[in-house]
Image (cartoon, rainbow, N blue to C red):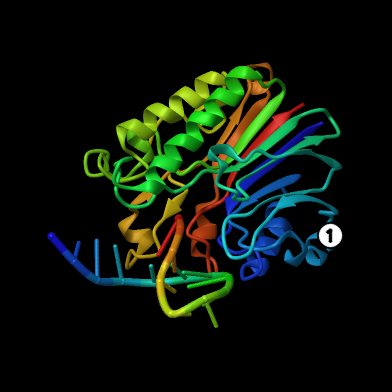
Amino acid sequence: MPFTLATWNINSVRLREPIVLKLLAEEAPDVLCLQECKSPVDKIPTEGFAALGYTHMIARGQKGYNGVAILSKRPITDIGDQDFASLGHARHIAGQLDNGVVIHNFYVPAGGDVPDRDKNEKFRQKLDYLNEMRDWFHGDRPQKSILVGDLNIAPREDDVWDHKKLLKVVSHTPVEVEQLAETQDAGSWVDITRQDIPDGRLYSWWSYRARDWDAADKGRRLDHIWATPDISNAGHSSRILRDARGWEKPSDHAPVFATFDL
DNA sequence: ATGGTAGGTCTCCTA
């Protein structure tokens, strides 16, 4: 049975409960992976989600920062989390659907402003986090798995509004792009979004700081859906719901979708 | 070269 999955950095699930409900009501993905919930798990407002059929949730949370959750219409089993780079942050959760598919939901550290691991601890932590992701997937090769989330890296030239201008901007530096590629290779992950939409500019994030985000369109593709090769051919119908960036009290990220015939 | 906006929360940190 095909299922549709979406990933969305929500930037406070409590403040943006109304637009989460809007997305669930209008788009009805089977599974919605959220990042930056900025909430302890017991304070996530689950009642409205359940009323729309999302009766299953697995999550990790902390006060004020980070936080990841998976809402599902179908049963999903919590199969644990990883604390890469030993940050003590709620940045990962894994679940297994009733069809056996494993879903990894990640919120990779943003990395601060200065792209220098010696001068910026946050950048070092981001690279360490990706290193440990790579080593983990290399040691325990994933199968029948999907990896989604805000990876905070836009790897391709057409994943950013201006490749040359962003070469020294955290999220598009060569060292980050290389680290992301190593992580992807370690799990033999296939970029489903780019498998479906191989050509042209594609963004999932637009800064709050732009005067007119839509007209300026200075976006980056920071949010990703990957799958292992044994199920990558089942993936299709990828899209980014740009409209959501213009909703009332929006997140600075738009949701990314893919459907899997499994 | 700079500062622009947003959310959470203990007055500034993070994105």
User: x, y (%) of residue A38?
Assistant: 61, 62
A101 lies above or below A56:
above
Residue type at the position of mark 1: Ala
Q: Residue at x 64, y 28 (%)?
A: A235
Which type of secondary structure does the marked residue at label 1 adopt?
helix
Q: Which residue is mark 1?
A: A50
Asked whether A205 or A40 is in front, the reply is A40
Q: Quadrant of residue A86?
A: top right
Crowding at label 1, few (<14), some or many (≥20) Cα neighbours within 10 Å?
A: some
Residue depicted at 37% across the width and 52% down the height: A112
Residue at coordinates 32% horizontally, 52% vertically from top-left? A113
Residue A139 location, x and y as percent?
62, 18
Whether residue A17 is visible = yes
Point 70% across, 31% down: residue: A260
Q: Looking at the picture, how far across and down is residue A3, in whole percent?
A: 75, 37
Residue sitting nearer the eye, A244 or A118: A118
Observer able to see residue A196: no
Q: Position of residue A154 (x, y in %)?
A: 40, 39
Q: For this view, does A89 lie left or right of residue A200? A: right
Which quarter of the image is occupied by the C terminus of chain A? Answer: top right
